């Protein structure tokens, strides 16, 4: 049997103890390593999740930024369109205001022209007041051809233009010369030691009228006035008829007599023509009422306006010279104007007449029909 050394036994026990401690420590470290691996794995998974969330958030942020940029661009485009629409509307409103102002000016000018034309075309005729009393209807053949003295009067207004101070009218012998002068904007006329600028213009004439007055004077009818109401109406009519029927006083056989008590007048129709003319020429007549009374006798006439026409005309050979400054003597200026416009080099020609109105004056020029041409 072998001998066991006690020291060797103790050493072996210590080695086993150290080995056991080392194994325990190894197990501990293995557990820690495993735990660390678990933590690492968990962290790796957590990191992957965070990266996914981050990537998703970044993508959402990018999408939102793109949408914001698109919204800003769309907003800017809408603002630009709205501003353009506002500017367009403002320009349209301004154009409408200008158009309205122009139309108002034209309307005012048209109203003034209408007033002027109405004044020019007014025919002022004093028509006497006539009180008419209807007693019966006259037959259609009541008036024969010889019952009236007929007359037709033609009234023709002469074309005219008002010349004001600083204007002149010049009439050439040829229309072509007047046309040449009207093409010039202005003419410089030498006068002594200075020059005078004149502006040739087309004459604007006032419209003129022409009409006929048809006058029919009855050879059988008269109006008797200034009849006093001295008796009853029937008796008064009888006495008037008897008095007017006496040839010794210039009367004649009475066909009808109508008396108006309110006006003190009578409408008398004689049977034969000529009596009414004779009595109207005398103007008065003595009638026997309660006393002898002098009454007034007047013709019965009817007038009718016919063929009323208005015309606009322009001059053929006459030109208006305007804006003439009164710097020299009137006669001297008229002579220089005539000399200047006679020269062919100044587009002039032979002058028929020239009339200058000095500043401060005014005159109306009348034109004969052969010096104007009628316009539609």
Image: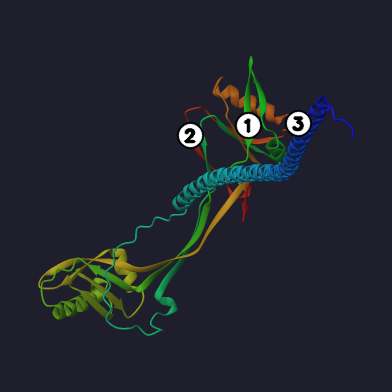
Q: Which residue is mark 3?
A: 344
Give residue 9's quadrant in the image: top right
Separation of residues labelled 1 and 3 (CA atoms): 18 Å
* Image quadrant occupied by the C terminus: bottom right
Assign a secondary structure to mark 2.
strand
Report the side of 162 relative to 346 (left or right). left
Number of dots carrying numbers: 3
| Whether residue 175 can be seen here | no
Residue occupying the point 28% across, 72% down: 132
**Picture layout, residue 282 above or below residue 19:** below
Q: Nearer the viewer, mark 1 or mark 3?
A: 1
Crowding around mark 2 (Cα neighbors within 10 Å: few <14, some 14 to 19, many 20+) is some
Assign a secondary structure to mark 3.
helix
Residue 80 in picture, x, y percent from top left: 64, 42
Q: Nearer the viewer, residue 270 or 3?
A: 3
Q: Which residue is mark 2?
A: 362
Q: Which mark is residue 199?
A: 1
Assign a secondary structure to mark 1.
strand
Residue occupying the point 56% across, 47% down: 96
| Whether residue 150 can be seen here | yes
Which comes before the other along the chain, label 2 or label 3?
A: 3
């Amino acid at each position: 049997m072998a001998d066991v050394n006690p020291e060797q036994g103790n050493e072996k026990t210590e080695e086993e103890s150290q080995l056991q401690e080392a194994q325990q420590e190894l197990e501990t470290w293995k557990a820690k390593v495993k735990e660390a691996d678990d933590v690492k794995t968990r962290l790796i998974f957590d990191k992957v999740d965070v990266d996914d969330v981050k990537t998703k958030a970044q993508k959402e942020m990018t999408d939102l930024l793109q949408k914001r940029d698109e919204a800003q661009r769309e907003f800017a485009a809408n603002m630009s369109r709205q501003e353009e629409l506002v500017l367009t509307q403002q320009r349209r409103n301004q154009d409408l205001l200008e158009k309205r102002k122009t139309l108002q000016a034209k309307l005012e000018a048209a109203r003034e022209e209408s007033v002027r034309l109405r004044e020019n075309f007014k025919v002022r005729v004093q028509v006497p007041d006539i009180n008419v009393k209807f007693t019966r209807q006259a037959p259609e053949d009541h008036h024969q051809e010889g019952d009236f003295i007929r007359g037709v009067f033609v009234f023709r207004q002469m074309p005219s233009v008002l010349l004001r101070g600083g204007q002149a009218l010049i009439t050439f012998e040829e229309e072509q010369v007047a046309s040449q002068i009207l093409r010039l904007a202005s003419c410089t006329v030498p006068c002594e030691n200075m020059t005078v600028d004149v502006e040739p213009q087309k004459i604007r004439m006032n419209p003129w009228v022409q009409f006929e007055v048809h006058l029919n004077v009855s050879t059988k009818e008269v109006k008797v006035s200034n009849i006093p109401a001295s008796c009853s109406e029937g008796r008064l009519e009888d006495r008037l008829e008897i008095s007017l029927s006496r040839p010794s006083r210039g009367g004649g056989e009475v066909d009808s007599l109508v008396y108006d008590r309110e006006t003190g007048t009578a409408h008398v129709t004689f049977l034969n023509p000529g009596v009414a003319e004779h009595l109207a020429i005398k103007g008065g007549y003595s009638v026997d009422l309660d006393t002898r009374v002098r009454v007034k006798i007047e013709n019965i006439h009817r007038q009718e306006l016919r063929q009323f026409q208005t015309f606009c005309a322009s001059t053929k050979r006459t030109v208006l010279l305007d804006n003439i400054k009164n710097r020299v003597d009137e006669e001297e200026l008229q002579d220089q104007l005539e000399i200047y416009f006679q020269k062919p080099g100044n587009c002039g020609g032979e002058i028929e007449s020239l009339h200058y109105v000095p500043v401060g004056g005014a005159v109306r020029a009348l034109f004969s029909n052969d010096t104007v041409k009628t316009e539609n």
